[in-house]
Amino acid sequence: MAFIINENGIEQKPGHTNKIATANRLGRSMIWKVIAQSVIGSSHVAGGRGCEDAVRYCQVPLPDGDEALIGFVSDGAGSAAHAAEASTLAVNQSVQIVHNWIIAGKEIDDIALMELAEQVYDKLDQVAQKKEAALNEFSCTLLGFVLLPQKACFMQIGDGAIARNDGSGYFTHLWWPHNGEYQNTTAFLIDDPSLKNLKTKVIDESIAEVALFTDGLQMLALNNETETVHQPFLNDLFKVLRMTENAAHIDILNNRLAGYLASDTINSRTDDDKTLLLATRLKNGKQVV
C-alpha cells in the first residue's frame, strides 16, 4: 500500500498531531516511532462541516531511560453542535492527565482508567455548563492506551478500535466497536455519569506495536464477517513505519499519512472523518517487530 502526498493540502483541525514531549527531539534515543493524523471526511466537506475527529499522543521519558507512550483518539458525534470541541478536549485532557500521573509515579490500573474517564466527563460537563449548552451537544467517543515498559493499559467508550501486534506479526482488536441497534449508532462518553459503557484492560506485558482508529476507518481496518482485524491494511502501513530511521523521516511519513487518508482510494470506501495513530517500538536502537 503506497502513501499518496496530497499537494493541495488537507483540511484538519490545528494541533491534532501535536505532542507534549517527543524523546527523539529532546536529544534522547528514539524508543517509539509514532505517526497520527485526523482528516476530514468527504461528507463533512460536502456538508460544510469541519473535522470532528481528534488525536493526541505523548512520549514520556522515564527515570530508567525507557519511555512511556500515551495515545488517545476521539470522534465527535455528527449530531452534536460542539462535536469538534468535545473530541479535541477529550484527547487533550486524557493525555495531559496521564502525562501528569506518570511524572508523579501514580500506578495506572483499571481504577485509574475509570478515574480518567470521570475527569474527562466532568470537564465536558463544565464546558457545557459554561456555554449554557446541553451536555449531549458534547457527545464524543474516547479510546486510547498507556504503554509502559512492562505494562499496557487500554480504555474505550464507543466505536472505533484499538489493535495490537500480538508479537507474531498478527494484529488483534482489544474490543469490537460498540454499535447500537443500527450500524451508525454508538455510545458516547457523556451518555451516563456512571460510565457503564467504559471498557478497560490492563495487560502485564510489553507491547511493541499498536494502532488506534475512529469509526471512519472501520470498513477498511476490520472484517465484519469474522470480527477480526483486516491484516493487510495494518501490515502494509506498519511495514513503512518500521523502515523509518529518524525524526525527519517520521515527519515526512506523517505528512504522507494525511494525504493517504484523504485520497480517492480511501474516500471511495468511507466518507466520514478518519483518524489513525500507529506506533512501533525500538529497543536499543533496533526494531522490536
Image (cartoon, rainbow, N blue to C red):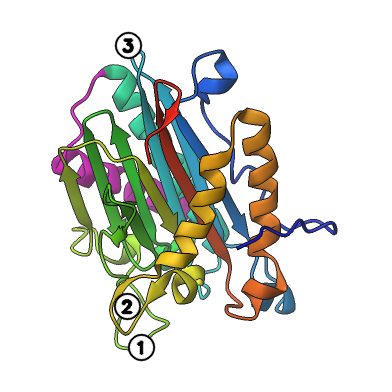
Residue 182's tag is 1
Q: Which residues are magenta?
A: 105-132
From the image, tell me which residue sits under label 2.
179
**Residue 246 seen by the camera:** yes
In the image, what residue type sits under mark 1? Tyr
- State the residue at coordinates (44%, 69%): 221
Q: Secondary structure at mark 2?
A: loop
In the image, what residue type sits under mark 3? Pro
Residue 93 x, y percent position in the rendering: 42, 40
Labelled pair 2, 1 in contact (Cβ < 8 Å): yes
- State the residue at coordinates (30%, 26%): 101
Question: Looking at this view, is 52 or 151 the one in front?
Answer: 151
Going by the picture, which residue comes out furthest to the bottom? 182
Labelled pair 1, 3 in contact (Cβ < 8 Å): no
- State the residue at coordinates (42%, 54%): 212
Residue 197 x, y percent position in the rendering: 22, 64
Q: Is residue 118 magenta?
A: yes
Q: Secondary structure at mark 3?
A: loop
**Foreground tag (1 vs 3):** 3
Labelled pair 2, 3 in contact (Cβ < 8 Å): no
**Residue 88 seen by the camera:** no
Residue 234 x, y percent position in the rendering: 46, 60
The C terminus sits in image quarter: top left
Q: CA distance from mark 1 to mark 3?
A: 48 Å
The N terminus sits in image quarter: bottom right
Residue 63's tag is 3
